[in-house]
Amino acid sequence: MDIFRYLRQTTMGIHAPIVVTDLFGRTQVRERIYLDSAATCLAIQPVGQAMIDYYTTSCANSHTSATASGRDTTEQLHHAHEDLGKLMGYDPQKDSVIFIGSGTTAATCFLSDAINCREHKPLAIVSSLEHHSNLLPWQRHFELLYIKAMDDGALDMAHLASLLRENTGKVCVVAVTAVSNVTGVITPLDRIAELTHAAGALLFVDAAQGASHIPINKTASKIDFIAGSGHKMYAPGSPGWLIATKQFFKGMGWMAGPIGGGSVDRVELDRVWLKDDPSERYEAGTPNIPGSIGLGVAARLLREIGMDKVLEHERALVEQCIRQVQAVPDAVVYGPLDASNKTSVVTFNIGSMPHGIVAAALNDMFAIQTRNGCFCAQPYSRQQIASACTTRGYCEPIQAGKTGMVRASFGIYSDASDIDALVAGLRVISEHKAHIMPLYEETSDGTWEHKAFRSSTGFDYRKLVTKFVEEAR
């Protein structure tokens, strides 16, 4: 059987039932269609199974060397670091893999603090494509210069070259995304690294949206630092991660990052001896063991599948989605209309309908789960909406707090039937917008809710606890 078809059959929760309504208020149960992988991926079956196996066979704290469970747990954490490093093309002799915090945000904040401690240059260059998590941490420490985006959403490489040429020797770090979470645009990392290093700067790559969708090789592309999130790599509940050169942290001490149990070789009341390996020094305290194991499983499986095949699979879906959504009345697609320079994400609007109503109606009436808004990348989203006006004549007014798009995003478990369902739903919404819009009201937080219906998955952990206690009695 084809690996992608098998993944679709076995991914956890992919066929979860949801109660939906229709145009006339009648309810029924449908299997959900998950098109929000850019926010969080569903858990592929081996990830969930590995976590269950850990809980049921070897649950113990790491670095407990006297017990079989402790030794096995420590060994599996080592494998997880190694498998992620291999997926990202690290050099095990030169690089450390650090699992840290709640996602790419935690890894980027830690690194920006560390670079600020080590480097003494006033400027950082950040692309205007960035998620806020790859903008605000640098804004806190440095004066920022921004790389422009082209009308089609691609990075303006000529502008980057100009910024670096004008500020050679002054720029501390260049921070760019590997793949935009708004348009799916892929950035040319090899060329960016070449320009960055020629200007004497360091390169940080935010791979939150890229690590599980495109081939990335840290060593071959000469990337200094790269970070990502386990929950965007089919291992929800997993930590963020950072791969960095060991040499960068030499002699740095504890000027940045967490410090505590496991960070040291020896402690005196007036002196400590920190561990040399950053992956040990900065993973203080008890790690997220099941999440880390799940991340290792996902990284190993992606390597087994082959990231070239993953890119080919998802790019075909993007190409189909762009073509079919464009054929929906009043639809506009943002970013490149050529799928050859993007992956995994398609953003759109339906005429002047609020993006919140479109996304809510897809969920409430068709069990199609997308995302809407600016996706924590407000400057880039506004730029793309403005570009659609200047280049294609689609001029939706930009309103503070209300401007945005609908995003459909794919994963290795997505297939063509998801897009067919999405487009069918969009056609109904477009053709019946005069009937649908009065069904919704805007809430105080800017979201849109159906006035008479609220869909639900039925998940409530409190019921689980109550049932368990009742059975125990």
Image: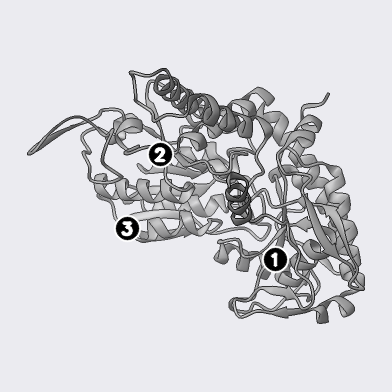
Crowd around label 2: few <14 · some 14–19 · many ≥20 (10 Å): some
Residue that badge 3 annotates: 141
As drawn, is 313 to the left or to the right of 154?
A: right
- Whichever of labels 3 and 1 marks the residue nearer the N terminus, that label is 3
Identified at 79% across, 56% down, the residue is 18
* Residue found 91% across the figure and 68% down from its top: 26
Q: Earlier in the sequence, mark 3 or mark 2?
A: 3
For disc 1, the marked residue is 405
* Percent x, y of residue 375: 60, 61
In the image, 223 versus 446, the foreground residue is 446
Q: Are marks 3 and 2 in contact (CB under 8 Å)?
A: no
Looking at the image, residue 472 lies above or below residue 300: below
Secondary element at tag 3: loop
Which amino acid, mark 1?
Met
Tell me the amino acid under the disc marked 3: His
Q: Earlier in the sequence, mark 2 or mark 1?
A: 2
Element marked by disc 2? helix
Front in this rendered view, residue 151 or 306: 306
- Label 2 belongs to which residue? 197
Quadrant of residue 381 within the rendered picture: bottom right
Q: Where residue 44 sits in the image (x, y, percent)? A: 67, 35
Residue furthest front as drawn: 473
Q: Residue furthest left?
A: 270
Give coordinates of residue 251: x percent, y percent: 20, 34
Q: Quadrant of the N terminus?
A: top right
Residue 188 vs 97, above or below: the answer is: below
Q: Which mark is residue 291?
A: none
Q: Is residue 329 visible?
A: no
Residue 364: percent from left, percent from top: 80, 65
- Out of 437 and 323, give the one closest to the viewer: 437
For the residues labelled 3 and 2, the Cα–Cα distance comes to 21 Å
